[in-house]
Image (cartoon, rainbow, N blue to C red):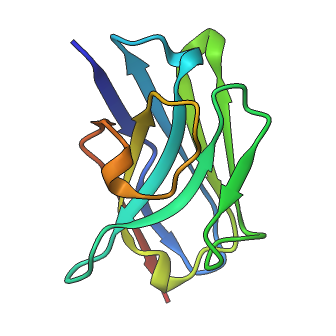
Amino acid sequence: QVQLVESGGGLVQAGGSLRLSCVVSGLSFSSYHMAWFRQAPGREREFVARISWSGGNTYFADSVKGRFTISRDSAKNSLYLQMNSLKPEDTAVYYCAARGSSYYSTAMADYRYWGQGTQVTVSS
């Protein structure tokens, strides 16, 4: 059974930092491209960042570029999202997702496995 379990969300003031984690089980983690998406209240889920299976290729949404970093640790079957200089508009539920393909993607529909999400709230 494939499981993706996010953690690390919480309440933080604007300008602060949080580090999200996603522990993956039930699949060959090192063979999957991984990504973070987020969904704010009343809005559609949107792409945040992705990382290749090797960790050598990353890509970010313009809204988080320069503030967020994505990384992975295959020894721990874990994905991370370091979020710095947080803004109130970063408030959302953050989801990790896994894609088993040789091609990169930022589209939700291309990711087969999803976690349950972790809430991030940034106060002004």
**Image spot of residue 36 (x, y percent):** 48, 51
Q: Nearer the viewer, residue 101 or 9?
A: 101
| Above or below: residue 59 compared with residue 5 | below
Q: Is residue 23 visible?
A: yes
- Measuring from the top left, give residue 56's x and y in whole percent: 80, 35
Q: Quadrant of residue 16?
A: bottom right
Q: With respect to residue 97, does 91 lie above or below?
A: below
Left or right, 75 with reference to 94: right
Asked whether the viewer can see residue 118, the reply is no
Q: Position of residue 82 (x, y in %)?
A: 65, 51
- Residue 102 in the image, given as x and y percentages of width and height: 58, 31
- Which residue is at the far bottom? 124
Does residue 13 appear left or right of residue 52 in this picture? left
Q: Assign the N terminus to one quadrant of the image.
A: top left
State the residue at coordinates (59%, 16%): 30
Q: How many numbered marks appear?
A: 0
Out of 59 and 115, give the one closest to the viewer: 59
Position of residue 104 relative to residue 49, above or below, is above
49 to 7, vertically: above or below: below
